Image: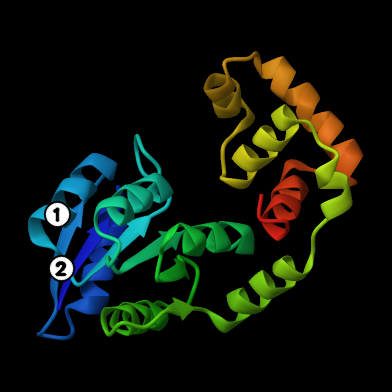
Amino acid sequence: MRVLIVDDHPIVISGCRALLETDPGVEVLEAEDGASGFAAFFDSRPDVAVIDINLPGHSGLELLRRIIGQAPEARLIVFSMNDDPIVAARAIEAGAKGYIAKNDDPALFAEAVKEVANGGLYLHPEMARQIAFLRAGGNADAISSLSPRELEILRLLAAGRTMAQIADLLNVSYKTVANNCTQLKQKLGARSAMDLMRIALGARI
């Protein structure tokens, strides 16, 4: 089994290698950013790729989408310090076959890789439960009243974009985005940007 690890922290890669190479049938490849990860994937065609969500340059989710766009059958796992179910759900929606938080039991890492390599899916049961509760939420009536600009900002927040990134993408000032976020919180009864992300995810914005 060939496994590609895409992470910019050498210690993390070393730890992953140590966990996987106890099995002599596993070959571990590595890349440190989105560009080299994309090239390494198509050069080596690994059985599984484990992608850190926070990579230099393009994010792990953007790398995942790029790979899936050219290889829909790719077996990809997102690896993250973030154990928020919103982030995990976004990864699964983007095409990931698994999601592992870096604070999970290390023994689960090798288990997840083997499960995905065998054609399965991997999500920690507690994470799956939290995502299910998110799916049960939603605020459809309030969302239907939002303007196109507000909907776009909400969608970008749900995709993990910062307000500064949203301002750049929409070609508006940071202050404009901040004001729109304040209005969104009032309209949707949210207290924070994280609440807005949960609402957007529940409504499948």
Tell me the CA gap for discs 2 and 1: 15 Å
- In x, y percent, where is residue 49? 26, 64
Q: Is residue 187 above or below residue 72?
A: above
> Is residue 193 something one can see in this rendering?
yes
Element type at mark 1: helix
> Is residue 54 something one can see in this rendering?
no
Q: Residue at x 91, y 37 (%)?
A: 186
Q: Is residue 121 above or below residue 149?
A: below
Q: Which amino acid type corresponds to the residue marked 1 in the rendered image?
A: Phe
Tell me where residue 79 sits by quadrant: bottom left
Q: Which amino acid type corresponds to the residue marked 2 in the rendered image?
A: Val
Find disc 1 in the rendering and name its residue. 42
Q: Residue at x 25, y 61 (%)?
A: 5
- Please name whichever residue, 38 or 66, is drawn nearer the observer in this view of the structure: 66
User: Going by the image, does 114 lie left or right of 112?
Assistant: left
- In x, y percent, where is residue 171? 57, 15
Element type at mark 2: strand
Find disc 2 in the rendering and name its residue. 28
Of the numbered discs 2 and 1, the one sitting upstream in the chain is 2
**Closer to the eye: label 2 or 1:** 1
Tell me where residue 44 sits by quadrant: bottom left
